[in-house]
Image (cartoon, helix red, strand yellow):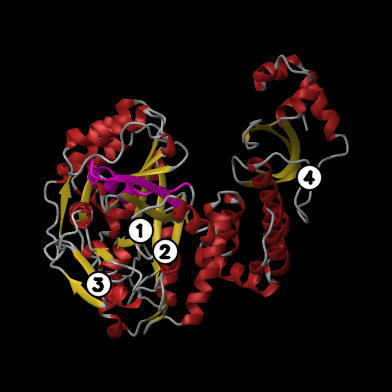
Amino acid sequence: MKILLCTLNAKYIHSSLALAYLNEFCQSDRWEIEVKELTINENLEDIMAEIYLSRPDIICFSVYIWNITPVLEICRDYKKVAPESVIILGGPEVSYDSAQVLADNPCVDYIVRGEGEYSLKELLQHIYDNASVAEVKGISYQVKNQIYENPDRELINNLDTIPTPYYGDITYYKDRTIYYETSRGCPFNCSYCLSSTIRGVRFFPLDRVRKDLHFLINQGVREVKFVDRTFNCHEKRAIELMRFIIDEKGTTKFHFEICADLLSDEMMAFLKDVPPGLFDFEIGIQSTCPAALETVQRKMDWNRLSHNIKALKAYDNIHLHLDLIAGLPCEDYTTFAKSFNDVYFLNPDVIQLGFLKLLKGSKIRDEFAIHGYKFQEKPPYQVLTNNYISYGELIELTRVEDILERYFNSGNMAISVAYIINKIYSGNAFHFYEQFARYWEEHGYFKIGHRREAEYTFLQNFVNDYHGVYAAQVNERLKYDYLISSRSYTLPENIHSCNPVNSNEILNSCLRDEIFVDQYLPQFKTKTIREMKKQLRIEYFRFDAVKGTDLTTPVPVLFVYNPITKKAQKAIYLKDHIGN
């Protein structure tokens, strides 16, 4: 008997922790298991052909909101060409209304609900033995159009009974993000989250986790993302694991979901000395509106949270990713704008503006009528409107999200955007993004793709049109942002240079000066001037990026670029050296 474990990931770089667990747990000398991780971006006909050519007797799909639609389409068509095959679904998207999924999809034979390791293996054993599955807990199934739902299976209390998902040859994961967990469950009960349906947190043994992390680090994997819902809910344990990772001295990066207001003074002191670039923190703030937080049963100490995030930012050694959710109950458009500004001025590296999804099994979905929710009938079940915010306002926020991604999360225009918000919009970040998004909509920019250079031009044009008195200052900052982020021989359209006609000769003079090269460009000492200039650019500015002040007389800046990334490694102010 051949079993195919399959899923469609959202992106190529993603990997499936669920399949990794099931593959290890369900191994048996009674059958053969093959794993296929594909993506939702692939042609469905190609996916189905690949599955068919594997000749599986049983196909098990791991199903989520992002892949349920194509998975079911594949199942329907596959059953037509291989009617004798057995199709099993599992995952959160089919666990909470399994009977309805079966009724709507006769091609599906079984659904494994909840934690799937024990249920799937037991189900496979019964199918292999051609035995009744009536006593297999945690499954739903149909026989001759009759649907059966067996009792739920108890949660796995001893998580160490589940084999480690990664060992041996992990070549497949080299260029992918590895997902890993040290615990299951969440200490909180936020009504929009599926974790709220299961109370309590269960932990894998520390020795096992250390062994797994040691293996992954020594394999040189690119990134490990912990899927623990709140990694620091057990702080002593969290510190111990973080310290272990640091002591391993590997190159692997680690991503944690944490609750910032739970960080104690001891933890903050520990985090201050974390090596730069090793850890990424994702912090789900979601909202700063007290009524919204109370309604969704989310506890947050804003004063403690904001204090800790500002301190982490000052440490400058951990990448900070903050989350917001639009569409929460009791939060209207104006209140959300305040939440946006509150989070924005914590100055994280990334702000993810997401939109509430009324997931199957979540409490907020069961209570949708209380708040007048209307949401998408099909996945991802995103909110369309409620008693507090209109569909039109949510459309505006989707455009704000797009602009935020381009102009803040990219990091490409940090100096320019900060100047515009603080100087022109008096510190109201949301108002800037809102107005700029409307400008994009009016000009039809959202409807087509753009080169990166065009985004600089659009921002300059926006300032020219609506805030012309600041146009010259913004020009200088956009020019600096552009040149610090990429090596280029030209500037974007409508971004103007103030270089003197002899700027190239000035640069050549500097590069012929051995003292200058020794002091500023020692790595270029063996290169010719022509070779050096491939990694250099001189540009004059009426703006001092170090002090953030405007200048009446332009000063030259020399950008030194990394030959691989094409980003500037440093910017050298040449005023003192060349005397102008």
Q: Nearer the viewer, residue 60 or 300?
A: 60
- Residue 454 marker: none
Q: Is residue 251 magenta?
A: no
Please, what secondary structure does the residue beneath circle 1 have?
Answer: strand
Label 3 belongs to which residue? Answer: 142
The answer to which quarter of the image holds residue 542 is: top right
Three-letter amino acid code at the position of disc 3: Gln
Label 4 belongs to which residue? Answer: 490
2 and 1 marks in contact (CB < 8 Å): yes
Alpha-carbon span between mark 1 and mark 4: 50 Å
Between discs 2 and 1, the one toward the N terminus: 1
Label 1 belongs to which residue? Answer: 61
User: Residue 510: horizontal and vertical position, in percent?
Assistant: 77, 23
Q: Is residue 69 above or below residue 525?
A: below
Please, what secondary structure does the residue beneath circle 3 have?
Answer: strand
**Does residue 294 appear anywhere in the picture?**
no
Residue at 67% x, 22% y is: 521
Between discs 1 and 4, the one toward the N terminus: 1
User: Residue 419: horizontal and vertical position, in percent?
Assistant: 59, 55
Residue at 42% x, 77% y is: 376
- Residue 71 marker: 2
| Region in magenta | 13-38
The answer to which quarter of the image holds residue 179 is: top left
